[in-house]
Image (cartoon, rainbow, N blue to C red):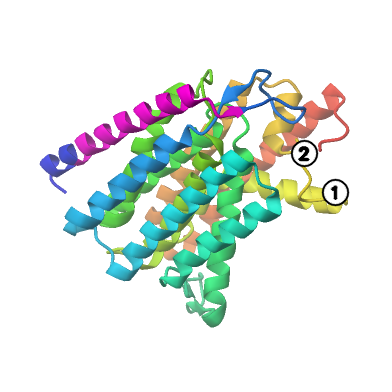
Amino acid sequence: MTLVALLRHLAFATALALLSATLVRVMIAVRVLDRPDHRKVHTLATPKGGGVGVVVAFLIGIAVLYRFAEFARLADPYFVGVIEASTAIAIVSFLDDLCDWKFAVKLTAQVLASLVAVSSGIYVVNYHLPYVQPLDIGWLAPLATILWLLFATNAMNFIDGLNGLAGGVALIAAAFLAGIAAAHGGWFAYFAALLLIAGLAGFLPFNFPNARIFMGDVGSQFCGFILAILAVVASRFDNVELSFLIVPMLLSGVLFDVAFTLIRRVVAGEQLTAPHRGHLYQVAHRAGIPATGVTLTHWGFTTFGGACALLFLAVPSEAKPFIPLLTLVPQLAWLAFVAHLARVAGIRRWG
């Protein structure tokens, strides 16, 4: 990629960031309110739906990419599948913000959006495992991809409870993904990640460190879904095949928090669909860590995951299996630290 091309891309991204910021201001004025309750940190009714700016910036950008950018095209069925699936999850999550659906309804809608993606052929069939031949999972491939899309989408949604947490994590993850994809010639993943960065850059100044508006489900679900889609696309459909593990490493802090919380709640016999405030990041805040401190910690986890992804790409094949495990080190340390703080603070029930 030439310097002139890069400058053009950055200029386009800047225009989309300004559009995103404008739409965020509109949503602040519209005042679809997120009202406080016992599970939430904020104490005043605050506008939500700031993710509309992120969504519109991305969808306009991806439409321009489809129409004009030959250098970053996927085959048409897959490209159209990305556009249709991202539009579907945007509509689903925006309606969720307006209607505050129960989790079962929300999950059903997410499944339908995921089906839009896999029905266009966007799923991983062969998993390249170390020391063995590629594993072909055959007819299970669409199901495995749907489960991944649902987990990543909801993980980002669940983590969106403190100012700047989900938006900052998504922006840092997208920045690493854009850089890695560009370095290896994965031009669609690069440009799509750049579009996500632009939308988030327009939103975050209104959300962190002090929130004039929240991202809402329309933003958090959309970011999780798009990053999950890009993990699949980059691993199979772009100009080069990047490892599917790159995005999970980037989102390791989010995925660990949600996975640990789900397992803890199952072991405790708690109803999984019941509202709670037992995520690690929530317990950390309840135990006395300022909200900004928790958010910056998760930004650090994402940056560490990005460093692990870069190391993963650099080391010989025989060493690659051990690199994703490195992302567990800060997560286990964080778990131990939060558990200690909870004991000191007298928090016996995490949920």
Q: Report whether 71 appears left or right of 201.
A: left
Which badge, 1 or 2, is on the more N-terminal residue? 1
Residue 25 drawn in magenta: yes
For label 1, the residue is 270
Horizontal and vertical percent position of residue 45: 63, 21
Dots 1 and 2: beta carbons under 8 Å? yes
Above or below 281: residue 231 = below
Q: Residue at (61%, 39%) from the top-left corner?
A: 159
For label 2, the residue is 276
Inter-mark Cα distance, 1 to 2: 10 Å
Is residue 250 something one can see in this rendering?
no
Q: Which is nearer the eye, 122 or 132?
A: 122
Q: Residue at (79%, 48%) from the top-left corner?
A: 264
Is residue 232 something one can see in this rendering?
yes
Question: What amino acid type is highlighted by mark number 1?
Answer: Glu
Q: Which is nearer the eye, 218 or 243?
A: 218
Element type at mark 1: loop
Screen quadrant of the C terminus: top right
Q: Which is nearer the eye, 308 or 347?
A: 347
